[in-house]
Amino acid sequence: LSATDSEALPWHEALWQRLAAARRADRLPHALLLAGPAGLGKSRFARRLSNALVCPQVDEQGDPCGRCGSCRQAVAGAHPDQLWLAPEEPGKPIKIDAVRRIAARSTLSAGVAGYRVVVIDPADALNRAAANALLKTLEEPVSRSVLVLVSSHPDRLMATVRSRCQLCRFVLPPPAETRRWLAGRLEADADALLAIGGGAPLRALQAGAADWPAGDRRLLGDLADLRGRRVNPTEVVSAWAEQPLGSWFDGLGRCLVSLIGQRSGARQSAYFHPGVEDDLQNLSRNIDLSQLFELYDELMRLQREASNHLNQQMLLEHIATRWLQITRNRGR
Ligand SMILES: [Zn+2]
């Protein structure tokens, strides 16, 4: 996430105004937990908040002025009162050393006129020792210092950490609002993309904007090779394991939606994989629509439940096996 990626999003507005008012009244909580499903821009919100809190002269909306020395430092990602704690690699835990470094710095008093802000994103990546170290910081709040935890899985946080934060809940905006927002940004069909994003606008936008055809082509090829029993599932699974789990889920989800579209005679499949209708037809030939739906539902369920602790290999093997089952004896 770049330092400037702090765009105001319409579905954030109520929460933003609440926090801006709290700041004006000098009643900002010491710790906030930004919680809610992925794809709603919680990290962006945290960035916007962090940029606003270091600026001593915010505008009426509570947004940073963009002109002062603090704002310039913030945009350059070099403000000494802004700390951003994330795993060294996605999916890896945040360890105690990192929390200790942050804690040591956050006991210093904040700069001239702004706040000191520590963002931990995703907070559910804190391992147990790190969370315990963080608790100490939460128990001794420092004036004009705000800790912002970001999590799509707040249930995985330690209850003692959760209970010391003010909960800021992010919920899926109404579909109509999301469609309006997406429509202004995408050429593609907003409804179809929204289905892929599970209702989360940013995920839907990503599905539309990302260079997915190349990756999806490979996935469709893998499904065809499995169906034709031309490859060993183990080879396919190890290729799948090389890409980030999130993009694999999204890609396979799109492939299955295309197959469902193809099988049910809908034209919608063309939105996702134009030009490969013949491949889709071969791939979905003789498969019951209900089985494709079941597989899709299962994929979505696994995606919701997927965690750092889940065995990724087993998950991929499971899906490959399920695909082999529904295509069994149907290839000829
Ligand atoms: Zn400023």
Image (cartoon, helix red, strand yellow):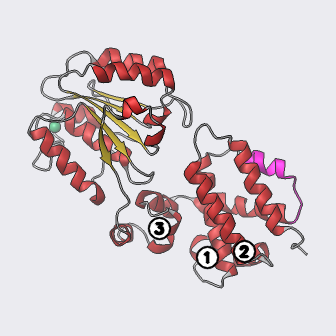
- Which of 319/9 is in front? 319
Quadrant location of the N terminus?
Answer: top left
* Residue ID for mark 2: 280
- Which residue is depicted at the point 49% across and 20% down? 129
Question: Which contiguous range is marked in magenta?
Answer: 228-239
For badge 2, the amino acid type reads: Leu
What kind of element bears circle 3?
helix
Within 10 angstroms of label 1, few (less than 14), some, or many (20 or more) residues? many
Q: Which residue is mark 1?
A: 269
Would residue 145 appear left or right of 317 to someone viewing this image? left
Which label lies toward us, 3 or 2?
3
Quadrant in which ligand 1 is drawn: top left
Q: Which residue carries the number 3 mark?
A: 194
Q: Residue at x 90, y 71 (%)?
A: 329
Mark 3–mark 1 distance (CA, rounded to whole Å): 14 Å
Q: Position of residue 275 (x, y in %)?
A: 66, 76
The location of residue 328, given as percent across then percent down, is 86, 67
Specify whether residue 284 is in view: yes
Location of residue 296 with respect to 5 vertically, above or below: below
Looking at the rendered structure, the kind of residue marked 1 is Ser
CB-based contact (under 8 Å), mark 2 and mark 1? yes
